[in-house]
Amino acid sequence: MRFTDYIWDFDGMLFDTYPRMRAAFSCALARQGCVRPDGEVMAAIKRSVRAAAALYAGQYGLDHARLMADYRAVEHASPPETIAPYDGAAAFLRAVLAQGGRHFLYTHRDHVALEALRRCGLDDCFSGAVTADDHFPVKPAPDALLSLMAKHAIAPERAVMLGDRSIDVEAAENAGIAGCLVDPEHFYDDYAAALRCESIAGLYALMDVPPA
């Protein structure tokens, strides 16, 4: 394998949560009388929910704090089954394990991410995790990754961060490890990533992982 330790982002990388997040953000906007096209909202939150909130608050004179609070409340109240892994995620996780590799999670989401792993039967694939409950600075700051690497003896040259946004790759670079951008919707075509593919299925060839 190209790497032995795989550090996964959660939203939009391991789990297909962006439709849920887009709906919650649109609801939060609507509570302040702002209705925007679904595609526009999706593109905005793909950069960052925090950045999207700042953008809309500035453009339309919305209350930023209320927008974020409403988004979190609506998103957390959404049914648990709307948090589901991408097709092929479980197979790739287990293919890496079969080759002696390890998996870790690094997400800005809280304990809900760990609950989703357990509910979907994927928790046994992971050797460690960092969530929002650990209160590290957000990506692209490297603090969470460095802590994870130190705790689990992850060698920088053998590790890769897998994510769907530029901040995932930048966090990896800031921590001294490789970063891989997985961008099925081509939101980041203009971003120069040394490692990139369009789906989890594309990781097999890119990471030299034989199917289990």
Image: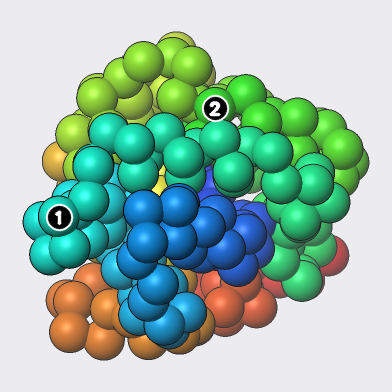
Q: Is residue 25 left or right of residue 84?
A: left
Residue 69, x across and y down, in percent: 41, 33
> Could you tell me which secondary element the residue under label 1 belongs to?
loop
Q: Position of residue 124 (x, y in %)?
A: 81, 32
As drawn, the residue found furthest toward the left would be 58
Q: Nearer the viewer, residue 16 or 70?
A: 70
Q: At which x and y percent is residue 53?
A: 27, 51
Q: Which mark is residue 200?
A: none
| Left or right of residue 108: residue 80 | right
Q: Is residue 156 in view from this perspective?
A: no
Q: Position of residue 20 (x, y in %)?
A: 62, 59
| Residue plotted at (15% across, 55% down) | 61
What residue sits right under mark 2 in the picture?
A: 110
Res 136 → quadrant: top left
Pick the residue in front: 212 or 181.
Answer: 181
Look at discs 2 and 1 and give the one toward the viewer: 1
Q: CA distance from mark 2 to mark 1?
A: 29 Å
Q: Is residue 203 above or below residue 51?
A: below
Describe the colour scheme in one phrase. Answer: rainbow
In the rendered image, the quadrant that contains the C terminus is bottom right
Q: Does the image show residue 135?
A: yes
- Asked if marks 2 and 1 touch (Cβ < 8 Å), the reply is no
Vertical order, 187 against 143 (above or below) = below
Question: Which residue position holds label 1?
Answer: 61
Q: Residue at x 52, y 57 (%)?
A: 27
Q: Residue at position x 84%, y 51% from top?
A: 81
